[in-house]
Image (cartoon, rainbow, N blue to C red):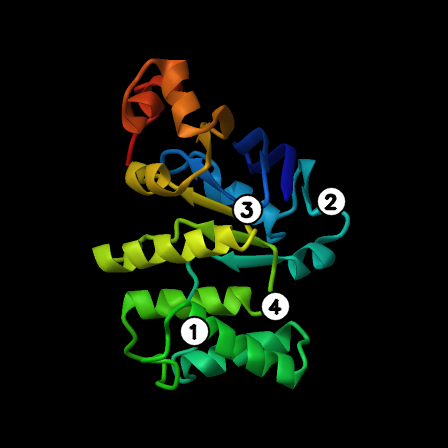
């Protein structure tokens, strides 16, 4: 479980995140929805300890990202917006290498690589060098690396950027499998369709602030709108910008 409490972050004179708070439960998918520049990625980067908050805190399974970032990293798997894979390693070698970085014994690394290759249906390319992979194959490899240490919490920053329709469908299936296994999943997006299709809870962020949160049905009821896009525009205001 992830509990976010009044996170704030500035870059010079720009206040990117203005007191963001929300909870993300185990066995559920929580989406951070907002236009580009709303503060979604900055919030996630504080959660996975790349950025230190100026104020506030967040707790991953009860552990503070501010006071115990190394411990937090052991319990999270991260798929960042710019995640790449080592092109001269195979998918399996990429997974094993990250398992070694996490301090896993060789037998455990081997077992986890086998499990993830099966879970993510990577058998056709697992022993081929990553150079020349499709975007979907790179995504699966990067996700497998993020999961090698069996984290309970998974953070994804706009994971469908650049993917074709079939790769997006495959990713949705993978995230649903992780949810069924009890993982806490948080991802950011500005794409209405993927949020509506996947999320149990939606946190709407605009101008660095949470303007609403709840289920899709709750947001529709709050705004009196049928579709998520219309509800979203009603919540953030038409001048906030959609991209």
Q: Residue 168's image quarter? A: bottom left
Counting residues from the start of the chain, the first of labels 3 and 4 encountered is 3
Report x, y in % for residue 16. 51, 34
Quadrant placement of the N terminus: top right
- Secondary structure of the residue carrying tag 4 is loop
Q: Identify the residue at image location x=32%, y=53%.
A: 161
Disc 2 target residue: 62
Q: Is residue 154 above or below residue 207?
A: below
Numbered mark located on residue 21 in the image:
none
How far apart in space, not on screen, are marks 1 and 3 (Cα)? 21 Å
Report x, y in % for residue 21. 60, 30
187 sits left or right of 134 in the view: right
Q: Is residue 138 visible?
A: yes
- Secondary structure of the residue carrying tag 3 is loop
Report x, y in % for residue 163. 27, 57
Report x, y in % for residue 195. 36, 39
- Secondary structure of the residue carrying tag 1 is helix
Asked if marks 2 and 4 touch (Cβ < 8 Å), the reply is no
Disc 1 target residue: 118
238 sits left or right of 186 in the view: left
How far apart in space, not on screen, are marks 2 and 4 (Cα)? 19 Å
How far apart in space, not on screen, are marks 3 and 2 (Cα)? 16 Å
Quadrant placement of the C terminus: top left
Disc 3 target residue: 27
How far apart in space, not on screen, are marks 4 and 1 (Cα)? 16 Å
Q: Residue 221's image quarter? A: top left
Q: Identify the residue at image location x=53%, y=55%.
A: 181
């Amino acid at each position: 479980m992830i509990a976010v409490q009044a996170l704030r972050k500035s870059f010079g004179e720009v206040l990117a995140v203005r007191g963001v708070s929300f909870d993300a439960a185990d066995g559920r998918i929580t989406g951070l929805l907002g236009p580009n520049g709303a503060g979604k990625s900055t919030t996630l980067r504080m959660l996975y300890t790349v950025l230190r908050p100026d104020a506030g805190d967040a707790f991953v399974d009860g552990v503070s990202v501010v006071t115990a970032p190394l411990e937090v990293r052991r319990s999270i798997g991260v798929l960042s917006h710019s995640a790449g894979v080592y092109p001269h390693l195979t998918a399996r070698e990429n997974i094993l290498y990250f398992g070694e970085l996490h301090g896993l014994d060789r037998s455990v690394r081997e077992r986890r690589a086998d499990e993830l290759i099966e879970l993510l249906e990577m058998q056709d390319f697992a022993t081929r060098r990553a150079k020349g992979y499709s975007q979907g194959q790179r995504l699966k490899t990067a996700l497998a690396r993020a999961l090698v240490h069996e984290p309970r919490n998974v953070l994804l920053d706009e994971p469908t950027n650049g993917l074709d329709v079939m790769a997006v469908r495959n990713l949705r299936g993978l995230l649903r499998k992780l949810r069924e296994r009890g993982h806490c999943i948080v991802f950011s997006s500005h794409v209405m369709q993927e949020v509506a299709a996947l999320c149990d809870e939606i946190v709407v962020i605009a101008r660095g602030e949470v303007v609403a949160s709840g289920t899709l049905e709750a947001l529709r009821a709050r705004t009196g709108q049928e579709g998520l896009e219309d509800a979203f525009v009603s919540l953030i205001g038409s001048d906030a910008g959609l991209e």
